[in-house]
Every structure is written in C-alpha cells, then in structure tokens.
Amino acid sequence: MVFAAGTTPLGLFAELRSRVASGAIDLTGVRPVQLDEYVGLERGDPRSLWDWLSRELLVPCRVDISAAIRFELDADADEACAAVERQLDAAGGIDLAVLGIGPNGHVGFNEPPSLPDSVTRLVRLDEASIVANARYWGSVADVPPEAVTLGLDRLIGARETVLLVSGAHKREILARVLEESPSPEVPASFLREGRLTVIADRAALP
Ligand code: PGA
C-alpha cells in the first residue's frame, strides 16, 4: 500500500491510529511502499517525507517498516528508483494507493508535464510545488529542488487508487481532473485511467 504524506491525509491517519489502538483494525500485514522523497537529505532530516509518514501513520499503526519498499537514497538516486521498480515487479504491483494532489495537479512528484507511462524516477520540482511546500520547511530556499517519485504508470496500475482532496485552493485543479480529458499538464488526471475513487471535502468540490 502507498500512502501520501502531506496535510490532506492527516485526518485519515488519525482515524486509522485510533482504530488500530482500539483493535478495530489490524494493519500489521500491510507492506508499505514509499510514494516519494526529497533527494539530498541527511538521515534524520525533519523534511523527509518517509519520516513524516512513519511518525503519523506507520509506527503508531504498527506497520512493518522493515518490509517496506522504499527509496534507498544513500547511493545513486537513479539506481534507487530502478530498485523500487524491481521490488514492485516482484511484489506484483500496488494494491492500494492513497494519494493527494498538488495545486499544480501533481501526484507524488509527477510534476506537470508528466505522461501516463512515466516510470519511477528522479525529478526536478516544479516551481509551484516548491512554493506550495515552502510552508512546511520555512522558506522557498529550504525546499530541496530534487525528488524521487513512483511513476504515474505505477499509480495508474494500482488495483485501487483513492485521491483525497481538501480545501478551496484545490477546487480549480480538481475540476480539471474531473471534467477535462486527461493531459500531461494535469498529471493526476491520468489516474482516471485506473480504478479511481475521489474523496473531496465541500470546499474542494467544483
Ligand atoms: P497537501 O499536499 O496534502 O499538503 O496539500 C498534497 C500534495 O502536494 O500532493
């Protein structure tokens, strides 16, 4: 299973934590797959998206992190991406991807323009993503310029994909995802080629 970091899924994560704590659900059998990560971070850097996800979801929900398919970024980023693809092939792909969308239409760090056959890869962040993420890291200059991401191809091919969308600042891009023909300028729009469920709050609904 793939879970996006970010603000949008925090309510979901809180609900999952509480259901795990009460024994209503058991996530110990889940094998987590990393969606994306900044490149060039030191181990333990608080900007790490994996650390965020571990803190908010994986550790409190007792998910087995040692079984994770994740980017090993201590070495070469291209090799780390190729290794993730190989492990996903061996695992039979992704069962469930719970994703967010950037105001620029990105999903993971598949920045516009991204084609539906985009593979897992190293990317340079779009200016819009750097601006949108600056709030987490203090300033635009603190946002790492490069990242790795699961490819759109993998996300479209997931057995189930759930796209969570929250807030009025996402309304315009959600309208484009739902109402326009899929296009590289709105990478998340290609999720419609897979088995997609969109869950949006009232503010984000077109
Ligand atoms: P957000 O991030 O949930 O923090 O808005 C979404 C994204 O950039 O994919």
Image (spheres, rainbow, N blue to C red):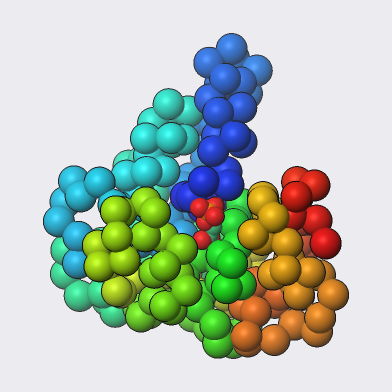
Q: Is residue 76 left or right of residue 191?
A: left
Rendered view: 127 above or below 44? below
Decide if residue 115 is in sight here: yes
Q: Residue at x 66, y 61 (%)?
A: 170
Q: Position of residue 119 (x, y in %)?
A: 49, 80
The residue under the point 50% across, 78% down is 111
Residue at the spot x=15%, y=56% of the render? 42
Q: Is residue 53 above or below residue 20?
A: below
Residue, x 29% and y 60% (percent of image)?
A: 139
Tell which of 172 and 83 is nearer to you.
Answer: 172
Give the position of the C terminus as an image quadrant: bottom right
Image spot of residue 174 (x, y percent) = 73, 66
- Front-most of 33 and 144? 144
As drawn, 72 above or below 54:
below
Q: Is 157 situated left or right of 151 in this image?
A: right
Task: Judge whether residue 92 can be spotted in this image.
Answer: no
In which quadrant of the rendered view does residue 143 lie?
bottom left
Quarter of the view holding residue 71: bottom left
Query: Most extreme residue toward the top, as rendered?
Result: 22
Q: Position of residue 197 (x, y in %)?
A: 78, 56
Q: Is residue 46 above or below residue 131?
A: above
Q: How far across and how far down the image is residue 63, in percent?
A: 44, 34
Could you tell me how many numbered marks the image carries? 0
